[in-house]
Image (cartoon, helix red, strand yellow):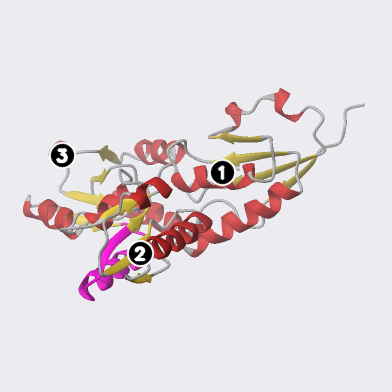
């Protein structure tokens, strides 16, 4: 008789409202006119493939756009990028997540108030590029070594990529405060609520499971953060994109298997 395995879903998992809204906007726009998305709308190959199947073009360089209308991804873009795109005579539709807009406004407020901006996140990530491309002087940090390389400024303003680990963000903010005790350090928490909910739920899930499956795109930052979070309390954590990535040997001897998923993972994949 095969052993019984209990499958536990995280309390919060899968697509957030920002991703759902971006997909709905893209599909609706494509019904009205030919559409090109400037980059991957979200970091999930299943979603991107489904959009292509609907006739939506994907271009990673505006020079390759062949439609009149282009869409900015859920990760947002700088004002400079938007202006340059419109200057080419293209119609720009923004699918930027509202919570990414919150991060943009936070960074702008810090700069306006005279703070040197420091962004906690991945420098090459499209969201971070959007947050920083309009800035003349800024820093991006992701770990302790990055903080140690920072120059001192009288006023330091900190914001974060919306999908960063909140624990990492708090740690780095505290480290910056300790490193520059004479500086006026202001932190605006821009890690989005869906990310926080999924990270917290993943933590609780990992504590009660022998194996955890994290479903999401290979290039999805928030999915990678869920993997890292789960590995703090579970030694058998596997990141998969679709069911074809699952391996039977992962579940040998397991009595409880947990499932969580990144914010761009479709329900049917979960």
| Quadrant holding the N terminus | top right
Residues marked 1 and 3 touching at CB (< 8 Å): no
| Quadrant holding the C terminus | top right
- Residue of label 1: 228
Q: Position of residue 90 (x, y in %)?
A: 12, 51
Residue 265 visible, this orientation: no
Mark 1 or mark 3, which is nearer to you? 1
Element type at marker 2?
A: loop
- Residue segment shown in magenta: 95-118
Q: Position of residue 200 (x, y in %)?
A: 61, 58
Residue 214 visible, this orientation: yes
- Magenta span: predominant SS is helix
Of residue 90 and residue 217, the one placed in the foreground of this image is: 217
- Residue of label 3: 66
At horizontal 64% and vertical 39% (from top left) the residue drawn is 213
Quick check: 235 above or below 105? above
């Amino acid at each position: 008789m095969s052993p019984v395995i209990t499958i536990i879903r995280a309390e919060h998992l899968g697509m957030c409202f920002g991703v759902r809204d971006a997909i709905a906007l893209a599909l609706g726009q494509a019904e009205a006119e030919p559409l090109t998305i400037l980059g991957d709308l979200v970091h999930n190959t299943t979603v991107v493939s489904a959009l292509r199947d609907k006739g939506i073009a994907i271009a990673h360089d505006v020079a390759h756009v062949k439609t009149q209308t282009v869409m900015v991804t859920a990760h947002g873009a700088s004002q400079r990028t938007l202006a340059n795109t419109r200057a080419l005579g293209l119609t720009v539709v923004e699918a930027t997540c509202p919570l990414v807009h919150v991060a943009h406004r936070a960074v702008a407020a810090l700069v306006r108030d005279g703070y040197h901006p420091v962004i906690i996140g991945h420098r090459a990530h499209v969201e971070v590029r959007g947050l920083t491309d309009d800035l003349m002087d800024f820093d991006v940090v992701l770990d302790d070594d990055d903080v140690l390389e920072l120059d001192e400024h009288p006023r330091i303003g900190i914001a974060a990529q919306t999908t960063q680990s909140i624990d990492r963000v708090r740690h780095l903010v505290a480290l910056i405060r300790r490193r520059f005790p004479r500086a006026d350090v202001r932190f605006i928490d821009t890690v989005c609520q869906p990310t926080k909910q999924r990270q917290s739920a993943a933590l609780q899930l990992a504590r009660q499971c022998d194996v955890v499956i994290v479903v999401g795109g290979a290039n999805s930052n928030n999915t990678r953060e869920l993997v890292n979070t789960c590995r703090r309390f579970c030694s058998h954590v596997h990141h998969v994109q679709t069911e074809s990535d699952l391996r039977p040997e992962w579940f040998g001897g397991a009595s409880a298997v947990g499932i969580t998923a990144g914010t761009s993972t479709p329900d049917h994949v979960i």
